Image (cartoon, rainbow, N blue to C red):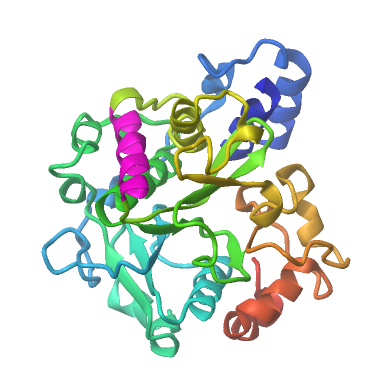
Amino acid sequence: MFKCLKDINVRRGKIGAVVIFILYVYFFENISESKSLLLSWAHFEDISCHYSVNEDVLPSADGNYFSPSYKSIFFLETSCRRNLTSRELCAIESAARAHPDYQINVMFTAPISDEILKHIGLRKKFKNVRFSRIHIEEYSKNTPAEAVVSSGALNKSHWGVEHTSDLLRYLTLYKWGGIYLDMDVVVAKRLDTLAANWVARECDTLVSAGAFTFSADSVGRSIAKDAISEIQRDFRYDLWSYNGPGVLTRVLKARCNTTDVTRMNTTICQGFEVYGPELFYPIKWENSNEYFKARILENKDAYVYHVWNHLTKNRTPDKDSPYAHLARTFCPSTYTLYGDRFGL
């Protein structure tokens, strides 16, 4: 169990490869989830953009006019880049193509100018794609997450971008219900053919928060309330994964009355399904470079392919790689638009 939890912390961090290697060699037996020695190597991410309104042309997701469809997929962009990469556009396009009857909500925590918006052509091509702006203080009002936001916990975080995303994914499905997806995925199949409420294991000891569904039924509402209450009760600004996959893992251990993640299923989890990693994480993070090498895609049955941006963001996919093949198939407009620059 320790290894999987430690591994995800390393993956989500911003530490250089040399530092990671040194920490693995010298501190493997000493680093724990309760108090990470990696903290001393961390830096604080600037998330001041979350509170800016300059050049903000997107409609607000905070007010009474934002009313997403009950058939919604949500993506969150919580960095201060104020733009979308080709990988993110691919994720959105693949979701929109697979779910033409769904509303694809792309939500930014930073202001987006009209000039930048003109360069993002997906809204014109796919009528079900909708962009909006989250003003985090307003968005969290009158919810269990309000106290976390008003306390300034996100601004204290060593990983403000990631922790903002962690909080908002649970808060968004708590508010609206629907499907949440990370931005570094390719959607290959319709997700509404799965259970009404689901998540997937990343490994034998950890439930991932990169893709999950909380529907509007009693099961979905119950798990959404449990997740946001866990965030409210025990938000940690000093640990990478505690507020993300850690939340769902802890909530499900209590709900399913087991500490064995591999045993979790709809029967013992009171109607909530936990799928195996082969459906969403067919290539493990430690083998993430396999997405970018010239090779045959072995698992062609996954619903979603996660390409692990934190580890692969500097990799360009070979034209005969699994990622390039997936992009040509499931986000062809984005792949054609970027050509040799796709994936950068």
The image shows residue 120 at horizontal and vertical percentages of 43, 79
Residue at the right extreme of this rendering? 295
The image shows residue 84 at horizontal and vertical percentages of 47, 67
Q: Which quadrant of the structure image shows residue 229?
A: top left
The residue range painted magenta reads 218-232
Q: From the viewer's perspective, is residue 11 above or below residue 282?
A: above
The image shows residue 291 at horizontal and vertical percentages of 77, 60
Q: Which quadrant of the structure image shows residue 293?
A: bottom right
The image shows residue 126 at horizontal and vertical percentages of 43, 85
Residue at the top extreme of this rendering? 30
Q: In which quarter of the image is the N terminus?
A: top right
Can see residue 174?
A: yes
Residue at the front extreme of this rendering? 267
Q: Which residue is drawn at 14% across and 44% down?
A: 141
Q: Which residue is drawn at 52% across and 21% down?
A: 39
**Depth order, front residue of 113/126:** 126
Can see residue 15?
A: no
Tell me which secondary structure the magenta stretch mostly adopts: helix
